[in-house]
Image (cartoon, rainbow, N blue to C red):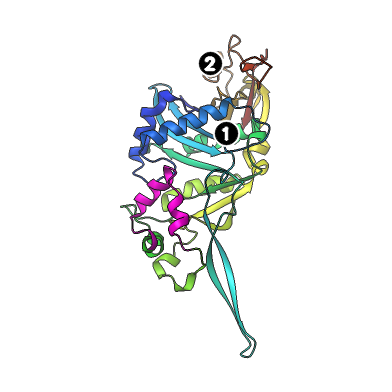
Amino acid sequence: MLLVRPVTFADLPGLERLAVISGGSMTTLPANRDHLSDLINRTQQSLRKEVTRYGDESYHFVLEDTDTGSIVGISGIDACVGLNTPFYSYRLDEIVHASQDLQIHNRIPSLHLCQDYTGAARLCTLFIDADYRTAENLSLLSRARFLFIAQHPERFSDRLIAEIQGVADDQNRSPFWECVGNHFFFMDFTRANYLTGINSKGFIAELMPHYPLYVPLLPEAAREVIGVARADMNPVVELLKNEGFGTSRYVDIFDAGPTLETRTAYAKSVIQSQLSTGLQCLTTHEGDTPLLVSNTLLTHFRCIQAQTTQDADTIAALSAALQLEADTPQETDITHAPNQTDTTQIRTEPQTRCVV
């Protein structure tokens, strides 16, 4: 069974393996043990934090093959970007040049370095081992985040973005980087991504040109990839568009990959998810379409994909995976009583959140 759950420190070797096989293609998953440990620590601290309004919390989840105990995928959500470290993008605008005497008005597309997405929530770090990379598993790992958001909306900004990796060749060389960024940073694309991933972002502000870049002056190889997703990211783009994400005027400053955007509360899986008692959704749902099912916990969040079933043994196994057993404490909130440590409230009837 494949299960999505929050990352823990026991998963560190699994994360290191995923970082290595990703080949440095993911900014947020660098092959750096200290960074990966910090990623886990931030998740655990965020889950244990009392939140009435979102801040700099970050949540990462792993896809676990429970039959082998292997960590085969990872995905994340940043509650709000740009609060502690700058979050840069290129905004694609037009600059108008006009001559009243000649009656000529030229609209020139240009790229403006900006921090317009400061304060937005971000989906990030979506990666699956090639041996498990199917449409069904990708859907589970990505959409599980929406069920977590639906259950804990106060923890996330009302604006949600997803940066999609831009065009790169088999050696992870980006045409946009080679034509633009490399002239200012004098390092290869993989190195720049790695430095950004381990939060060494000061060099961006120090070295990146702050004046608009006129798109027609860029080499054709760079112009052609602005706002274009890498070919193997198309399934992710389609999945997000099905959730209600749309394209924006913003692209990544390194590879010019597109940024997709939606209102957090309007994501399809957030709107259409429903609360159910136990696994009642699997016994009452009509149709053969698999359901995405999660519990409603915080630190012990679990999510699976399951078919409609009436089989008692299957229901029992799924209940155990989602920690819905009668003797399992069901947290509803983390509260702080005076002079007491964190406590959890107990609910007698475990609930689930389900969506087709």
Quadrant into which the C terminus falls = top right
Residue at the image position 60 percent from the left and 13 percent from the top: 329
In the rendered image, which quarter is residue 14 located in?
A: top left
Query: Does the stretch in magenta take in 198?
Result: yes
Residue 26 horizontal side relative to residue 300, left or right? left
Where residue 40 appears, x then y in whole percent? 46, 30
- Residue at image point 56% right, 23% down: 299
Taking the view exactly as shown, the residue that stands out farthest to the bottom is: 101
Q: Is residue 125 above or below residue 42?
A: below
Residue 160: x %, y % from top left? 60, 45
Q: Work out whether 168 lies above or below 221.
A: above
Residue labelled with disc 2? 320
Task: Determine which residue is flagged by label 1.
Answer: 289
Density class for disc 1 (Cα within 10 Å; few <14, some 14-19, many ≥20) is: few
Left or right, 206 with respect to 271, comes to left
Confirm whether the magenta stretch covers residue 100.
no
Dot placed on the residue nearer the N-terminal end, 1 or 2: 1
Closer to the observer: label 1 or label 2?
Answer: 2
